[in-house]
Image (cartoon, helix red, strand yellow):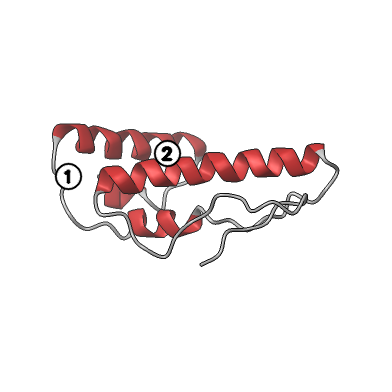
Amino acid sequence: MSNPVSAGGEAMPGPTSEAPTSLTAAIHRYRRDCATYSAACDQAAADGGSDDLPRFYEFTSEIISAWDQPAESLAEAKAALTLAIDDYEIGRTPRIPAMM
């Protein structure tokens, strides 16, 4: 899968076709992809371009939503619970059942 291209023509960091191997990796990758997408939208708006960019964070969001394995450590359980609470607070709930 290729990386999206910004309004300025530079390749933006994006997803790869491989799934993260742990829940912690998936959560970190999702948060990184969301932050990258948000920064790209902000930059596009500042440059006067369209902020309608590919939502490449959706790949890891889908992986997290379908996660069906228990957490492998207390830290991983805490990261999953934190993501579920964050989703609840902003009104996005598709990942909450998988994280609980």
What label does residue 88 carry, if any?
2
Quick one: 2 or 32, which is closer to the camera? 2
| Distance CA(mark 1)–CA(mark 2) | 20 Å
Residue 5 x, y percent position in the rendering: 67, 56
Q: Which residue is mark 1?
A: 71
Quarter placement of the C terminus: top left
Residue drawn 50% across the image and 37% down it: 90
Where disc 1 sits, the SS reads loop
Residue drawn 17% across the image and 44% down it: 71
Q: Using the rendered view, name the quadrant where residue 84 is placed.
A: top left
Residue 8 x, y percent position in the rendering: 77, 49
Q: Find the residue positioned furthest to the front.
A: 10
Where disc 2 sits, the SS reads helix
Q: Find the residue positioned furthest to the right.
A: 48
Residue drawn 66% across the image and 43% down it: 40
Is residue 94 found left or right of 100 in the rendered image? right
Residue type at mark 2 is Tyr
Residue type at mark 1 is Ala
Residue drawn 69% across the image and 44% down it: 41
Is residue 92 found left or right of 97 in the rendered image? right
Q: How many marks?
A: 2
What label does residue 13 carry, if any?
none
- Sequence order check: which comes first, mark 1 or mark 2? 1
